[in-house]
Image (spheres, grey):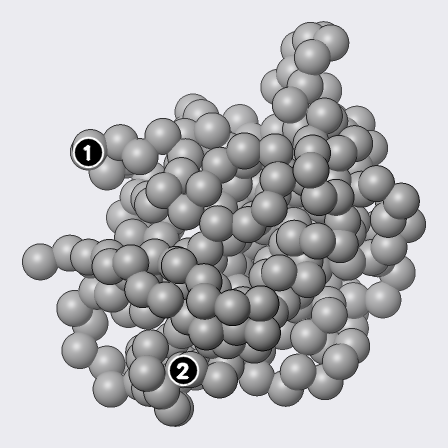
Amino acid sequence: MGAVWTEETLNSNAGPLRVRVYRGDSGAKAPPLVLHLHSGAFLEGSAKCGHLVSTLLADAGAVVVSPDYCDAAKEPFPAALKFTYEMLGCLCKDRGALASKKSALYVAGEEAGGNLAAGLALKARDVAFGSLQGQILLSPMLDPSVATGSFRKMQGGATDCKWLDGWKHYLGFGACHPYAAPGLSMRLGGVAPALVVTAEDDPMRDESLNYARRLREAGVMVQEHVLAGKTGWPIAYCECPSVRPPWGETICDYFKAFFQETGALPQ
């Protein structure tokens, strides 16, 4: 039996919040507890859009909480970051009910959700949050210039770009803030260990690998992977296919290995 999800309510300072909670059948007494943030270029998407990645995280042994977050066209930075930080606090407070009081806490996200996860890891370090065991970033949006070699190659000269549009809406007046654009942060030391995954055909490949390199140079433990061949990332993991894609088991194994190396699951 694979992972299953239920809709549950978390109590926050802003009132009750409906979220998806995914649980697998790993049998761990204290499974890792993951706040997972979906993709959508800051302008679209939902917890439903993040179903595939949430399921892979749960199949790797985690309990996964996946919320919807605000549309940057209506609420630019820092609205989504504030909301997701509030969610992180809810998970920390309610970890015993969601998983176990001894469960390690993680943030994870793909594309725009990867940006938020990286921003949360920076903020958690700065405010001495103290409970973040790791960050899981899949083709994260980190560089608002959208001018890397991988981006130019995959765009092929197209003038319309949903990621550029998303950045313009999300940044608002926060263009220079490291929480908004983690790839531009000058201070990366002391953040939680990172798993960074991208693909050969991923527009965010170069910024993902550059961020992994800079984290490593800052003394952060990093696991880094590049999927070979044609994956269709980052769009492919938002399509909710009825059949798990060829790279699904590989990603699940990456998640499991990261949970093990960071001490959340036994080796």
- Give neighbour class at mark 1: few <14, some 14-19, many 20+ (Cα, 10 Å): few
Where, quadrant-wise, is the C terminus in this rendering?
bottom left
Q: Secondary structure at mark 2?
A: helix
Residue 240 appears left or right of 26? right
Label 2 belongs to which residue?
95
- Find residue 111 and report its horizontal and vertical position in percent: 57, 41
Q: Is residue 223 above or below residue 126?
A: above
Residue 14 appears left or right of 49? right
Label 1 belongs to which residue?
243
- Find residue 260 and report its horizontal and vertical position in percent: 39, 75
Residue farthest along the front direction in this orientation: 15
Residue 211 versus residue 213: which sits nearer the camera? 211
- Give neighbour class at mark 2: few <14, some 14-19, many 20+ (Cα, 10 Å): many
Residue 55 versus residue 249: which sits nearer the camera? 55
Quadrant of res 13: bottom right
Q: Secondary structure at mark 1?
A: loop
**Residue at screen point 69% across, 34% down:** 73
Residue farthest along the left direction in this orientation: 1
